[in-house]
Amino acid sequence: MLGIKQEALAFELGDDWNQKKISLLEQKETVESDILAQVAKILKVPAEAIENFDEENAINIISNTASFDNCQQPAFFNNQPTFNPLDKMVELYERMLQQQKEMIEKLERLIEKN
């Protein structure tokens, strides 16, 4: 899943390891904690991540994760908001009318005082 070959992992684990031994290790239901810690260190992941690994969830996460490897643009990056300029003009006009009404009211109050 991380793209590391069995031979490379065997090389990193030391002289006692080979590709066949790594293959057998992958098929085991349980792995000794010291070997698990070594493998986790080499893969640069926490040992708990390997212990709690669920292949079905991992595949689901990978299939739902955005990737540019296949030259497709993920849907959530396709953000093209649409602003209707006419709506913005109407909003501006309404604000200007409101300001004008307020100004007229202020002037009327000033006239009444005098």
Image (cartoon, grey):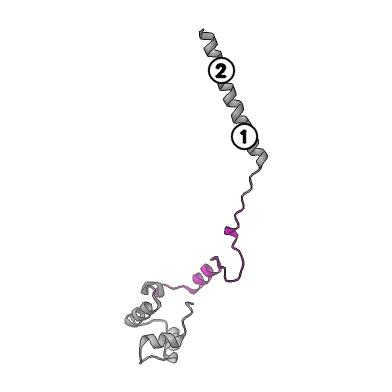
The residue wearing badge 1 is 91
Residue lying at the far right of the rendered structure: 86
- Locate residue 42, reporting x and y percent: 38, 79
Tell me if 47 is positioned left or right of 56 in this view.
left
Q: Name the residue under label 2.
A: 105
Of residues 111 and 27, the one nearer the viewer is 111
Q: Along the polypeptide, which appears first: circle 2 or circle 1? A: 1
Between the C-alphas of marks 2 and 1, the distance is: 21 Å
**Residues rendered magenta in the picture:** 51-80
Tag 2: amino acid? Glu
For residue 45, what is the image quadrant?
Answer: bottom left
Could you tell me which residue is drawn at 37 percent across and 82 percent down? 31
Name which residue type carries label 1: Glu
Mark 1, secondary structure of its residue: helix
Asked which quadrant contains residue 88, the reply is top right
Q: Is residue 19 magenta?
A: no
Q: In this rendered view, identify the residue nearer to me: 85 or 28.
A: 85
Q: Work out which residue is located at the far top of the displayed protein and give it.
A: 114
Residue at 67%, 39% (x, y): give it.
Answer: 86
- Whole-percent x, y for residue 28 in the image: 42, 84
Q: In this view, does 29 lie to the left or right of 111?
A: left
Q: Residue at x 56, y 69 (%)?
A: 63
In the displayed structure, would residue 32 be above or below residue 79?
A: below
Q: Where is residue 6 in the image (x, y as percent from the top left)?
A: 45, 86
Q: Where in the figure is residue 65, as x and y percent of width and height?
A: 53, 66
Q: Dot 2, crowdedness within 10 Å: few (<14), some or many (≥20)?
A: few
Q: Residue at x 53, y 69 (%)?
A: 60
